[in-house]
């Protein structure tokens, strides 16, 4: 049954409200719950909408003082300006999978207690200027809603937003001015087709806590890390995994003084030059699954907060601990590369207490002086290489906190038999030996 201007009550997760919808409603199931004095949601009624508005109003009175949440199961193609306005104590709305095609500006006006908006799996296509204005909702979710256009000012004066999710839509560009005076913790734009971010697009985002802002932009088509795009001192995390970035340039991070987490795996980066990351406060640097064959000596100098350097599944042919000079202890994962040897002095600049992963490379030879100058390691993983010999003196002066993994190499157990007790006591793992 289709109705125009039905007065309906919708409730979700134990909250109820009376909602006047001007649009197409085929059918809807409504559950009305009340929050009791002991903070437990009590089911009031569950019934089907058939156009009998009086029945709904009797079950879920508009003048109730309880907080309300709503969910509709049915079809609503348009939300109008007065569809939701002034509903007392409304804290959540969920219009997922209702065929929604349009939200008119003003729909969410005068809802001071609204905390959560879920509009995923719809056919919205466009969010207009002024659609979400003056809200304190902590969660806005628009996953898989076919959105291809965000007009400037679609999000204005939002405060205390924990997450705004627009992932898995059809966005190809984000223009400056879409986000105007938005206080936010996480902005999720993953899995779109974004190839263009207009300069200054994130400039009007603000953090209302010390954690900062996280930008999730993975699985798009972004080709460059533009410092005029990523220009906001409140940004603390950027995820650009699985994009099309091929070059990192000195100065790319100059406008991100509080950046702590940077994820760039699955791009087309070939080289890490000096001057990109130097002296930054990054704690986790993820460059996995690129085409990196060159890391400039000193490329990580001054990164005194770095705790994890991930560079596995690249094209490195040489190991040079000069990359790690002057760093604190950290985890470095350079597995699944093409490193063929560990020459003399290879670990001289590795910070004490670090965990080094060199598994799944092509390492055959380990020089007698490979670990000279090293005092301690948390762990060293050399498994799945082609090492033929391991001398008992290699790590004689090195304190191993956990283990050295030499499993799945070419070492003959018979050659190591006399040294096995000493090596095992040191934490060296040989697999079947």
Image (cartoon, helix red, strand yellow):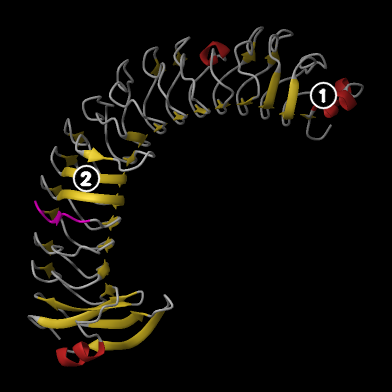
Residue 406 visible in the current orientation: no
Marks 1 and 2: in contact by CB < 8 Å? Answer: no
Q: Which residue is mark 1?
A: 412
**Looking at the picture, how far across and down is residue 185, in whole percent?**
33, 45
Residue at the image position 18 percent from the left and 82 percent from the top:
8
Closer to the camera in the image, 266 or 371: 371
Residue 168, position in %: x, y? Answer: 29, 51
In the displayed structure, 417 sits above or below 62; it is: above
Left or right of 320: which side holds 98? left
Q: Verify whether residue 209 appears in magenta.
A: no
User: At 29% across and 62% down in the image, what residue appears?
Assistant: 116
Mark 2 / mark 1, whichever is N-terminal: 2
Mark 2 residue element: strand
At 17% from the left and 49% from the top, the residue drawn is 157
Q: Which quadrant would the C terminus be assigned to in this image? A: top right
- Structural distance between the alpha carbons of marks 2 and 1: 63 Å
Numbered badge on residue 182: 2
**Which residue range is magenta in the image?**
128-135
Q: Is residue 129 shown in magenta?
A: yes
The quarter of the displayed image where residue 265 is located = top left
Residue 112 in sight:
yes
- Classify mark 1: residues with Cα within 10 Å, few (<14), some (14-19) or many (20+): some
Judged by its main secondary structure, the magenta piece is loop
């Amino acid at each position: 049954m289709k109705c125009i201007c039905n007065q309906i009550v919708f409730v979700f997760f134990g909250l109820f409200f009376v909602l006047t919808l001007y649009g197409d409603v085929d059918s809807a199931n409504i559950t009305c719950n009340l929050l009791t004095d002991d903070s437990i949601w009590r089911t009031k009624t569950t019934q089907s909408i058939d156009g009998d508005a009086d029945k709904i109003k009797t079950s879920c009175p508009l003048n109730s003082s309880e907080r309300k949440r709503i969910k509709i199961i049915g079809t609503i193609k348009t939300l109008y300006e007065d569809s939701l306005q002034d509903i007392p104590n409304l804290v959540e709305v969920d219009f997922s999978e209702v065929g929604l095609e349009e939200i008119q500006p003003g729909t969410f006006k005068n809802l001071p207690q609204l905390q959560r908006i879920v509009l995923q799996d719809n056919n919205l296509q466009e969010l207009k200027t002024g659609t979400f204005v003056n809200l304190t909702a902590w969660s806005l979710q628009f996953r898989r809603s076919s959105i291809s256009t965000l007009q400037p000012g679609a999000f204005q004066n939002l405060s205390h937003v924990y997450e705004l999710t627009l992932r898995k839509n059809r966005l190809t560009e984000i223009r400056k001015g879409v986000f105007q005076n938005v206080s936010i913790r996480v902005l999720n734009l993953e899995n779109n087709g974004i190839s263009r971010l207009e300069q200054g697009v994130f400039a009007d985002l603000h953090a209302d806590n010390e954690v900062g802002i996280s930008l999730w932009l993975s699985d798009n088509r972004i080709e460059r890390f533009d410092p005029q795009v990523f220009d906001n001192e409140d940004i603390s995390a950027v995820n650009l995994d699985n994009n099309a970035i091929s070059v990192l340039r000195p100065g790319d991070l100059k406008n991100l003084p509080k950046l702590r987490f940077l994820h760039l795996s699955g791009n087309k980066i070939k080289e890490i030059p000096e001057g990109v990351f130097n002296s930054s406060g990054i704690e986790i640097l993820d460059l996995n699954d690129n085409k990196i064959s060159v890391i400039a000596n000193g490329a990580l100098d001054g990164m005194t907060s770095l705790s994890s350097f991930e560079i596995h599944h690249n094209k490195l042919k040489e190991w040079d601990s000069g990359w790690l000079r002057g760093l604190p202890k950290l985890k470095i994962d350079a597995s699944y590369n093409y490193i063929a040897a560990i020459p003399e002095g290879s670990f001289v600049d590795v910070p004490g207490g670090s965990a080094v992963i060199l598994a799944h490379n092509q390492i055959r030879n380990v020089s007698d002086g490979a670990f000279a100058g090293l005092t301690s390691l948390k762990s060293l993983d050399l498994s799945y290489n082609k090492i033929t010999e391991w001398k008992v003196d290699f790590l004689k002066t090195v304190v191993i906190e956990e283990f050295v993994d030499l499993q799945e190499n070419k070492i003959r157990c018979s050659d190591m038999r006399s040294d096995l007790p000493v090596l095992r006591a040191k934490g060296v793992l040989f697999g079947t030996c």
